[in-house]
Amino acid sequence: MGVPPHRFATMRAMPSPHHLFLTTSTREPGHVGNTEWLARQAAAALPADGAQTWLHLAQLELPPFVDLRHTAGQYPAPTGDMKTLLDATLAATDIVFVAPVYWFSIPSPLKTYLDHWSGWMRVPGLGFKEAMAAKTLHLVTTSGDRAKAQPMVDSVQLCAQFLGMRFAGALWGKGGPPGAVQADAAAVEAAASFLIADCAHP
């Protein structure tokens, strides 16, 4: 049985997977924390022909967000590291927040990044919100207790919903001291399929 022409056109129009991994821990450089380790296990299972970009938010110059929504009402196009981050965000089909739980919430570099979404939605001609609606958001996180991570997971899901993004769920592992998540057999097993199970999403 042949593929209907309209379906073939849809298949051809699908972009190649490009995962943007945003590591958001404030751990000092050179030390891989539990959450990044778990995310890299998930990334290793992705198809070799898919693109991956890794950015460490704490190593970028991210200025505090200035709220101009009800004054100027729009923002200039970003420059420097902010342009790098925006370009990487728009180029990705899938965005993976690599975010340990800090005080039952997200790390501060990730909060700053999300704040700048409000500005990017108001850059004339950018079409940020419309572009984001075609993307999928994933979360990789670790903490000492899964139940206490839920508020953070819910927050990330609501951010995805606000922009019309598809939320593909959270991969959680038991964190703590460096290397602790490697003993979480369930998390390590789940990492092997967390991202590849979603590669064929329509």
Image (tube, rainbow, N blue to C red):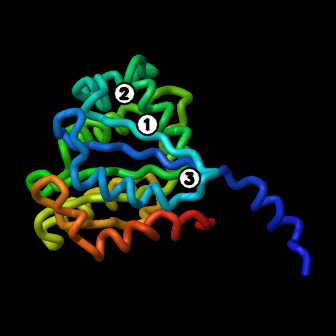
Residue at image position (46%, 70%) is 193
Query: Residue 50 or 85: which is nearer the viewer?
Result: 50
Residue with the mark numbered 2: 73
Q: Which amino acid does label 2 sit on?
A: Gly
Q: Distance between the residues labelled 2 and 1?
A: 10 Å
Query: Residue 121 or 137: which is nearer the viewer?
Result: 137
Q: How crowded is mark 1: few (under 14 residues within 10 Å), some or many (20 or more)?
A: some
SS at badge 3:
loop
| Between marks 1 and 3 in the image, the one whose residue lies nearer the viewer | 3
Query: Residue 150 or 200: which is nearer the viewer?
Result: 200
Residue with the mark numbered 1: 121
Residue with the mark numbered 3: 134
78 above or below 99?
A: above
State the quadrant of the N terminus: bottom right
Query: Is residue 130 visible from the viewing direction of this image?
Result: no
Q: Whole-percent x and y of residue 197?
A: 52, 70
State the quadrant of the C terminus: bottom right
Residue at image position (25%, 29%) is 65
SS at badge 1:
loop
